[in-house]
Amino acid sequence: MPELPSDIRTELLYEAHIDLAAPEAIGQSPFGARAVYIVTGGTFEGPKMRGTVRPGGGDWFLSLPNGAGELDVRATLETDDGALILITYHGILDVKPEVIRRVFAGEDVSPTEYYFRTTPRLETGDERYAWLNKTICVATGYFGINKVGYRVFAVR
């Protein structure tokens, strides 16, 4: 068997700062408590791309019985040169209840105090960004009252 790489190298793709509407509680289901967070706008910027996050996407967030949360996100990015890029991802947000209380009391809590990781997948028909269709990404995130943000990395 050939020797496999011993590490995973990443490169910053972009940072995003996203504004959200107040959550819509779907309620308790057999899978957990579901809430929908609708995107109202935002921005993203990185070495090879920048632009806005278009309103209308969202996160169909599921609070799991074990205390963690599962993200299920779809949104549209619009680059400053007019390309549309669909981003979809799943992820995990694991936050202690006392940290959640601090966030919702208005404190800017460091993302090092919780686990927030996602696996973004980008899709576009614009040839200038076609390389995104073949790129695997990972991301770290932060959250606050009606806002969320990410550092998205391309796996090389």
Image (tube, rainbow, N blue to C red):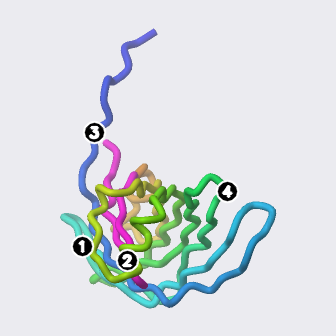
**Structural distance between the alpha carbons of marks 1 and 3:** 20 Å
Quarter of the image for residue 78 reads: bottom left
Per the image, the residue denoted by label 2 is 144
Rendered view: 38 above or below 75: below
* Left/right of residue 61 with respect to residue 119 in the rendered view: right
**Structural distance between the alpha carbons of marks 2 and 4:** 22 Å
Per the image, the residue denoted by label 4 is 65
On the image, the x and y values in percent for residue 18 come to 37, 80
* Left/right of residue 33 with respect to residue 116 in the rendered view: right
Looking at the image, which residue is at 24% across and 73% down?
A: 45
Note whether residue 15 is visible.
yes
Q: Within 10 angstroms of label 2, few (less than 14), some, or many (20 or more) residues?
A: some
Q: What's drawn in magenta, residue-wise?
A: 138-156
Q: Is residue 154 magenta?
A: yes
Using the image, tell me which numbered label, if any, was put on residue 15. none
* Disc 2 + disc 1, Cβ < 8 Å: no
User: What element does badge 2 sit on?
Assistant: strand
What kind of residue is marked 3?
Arg
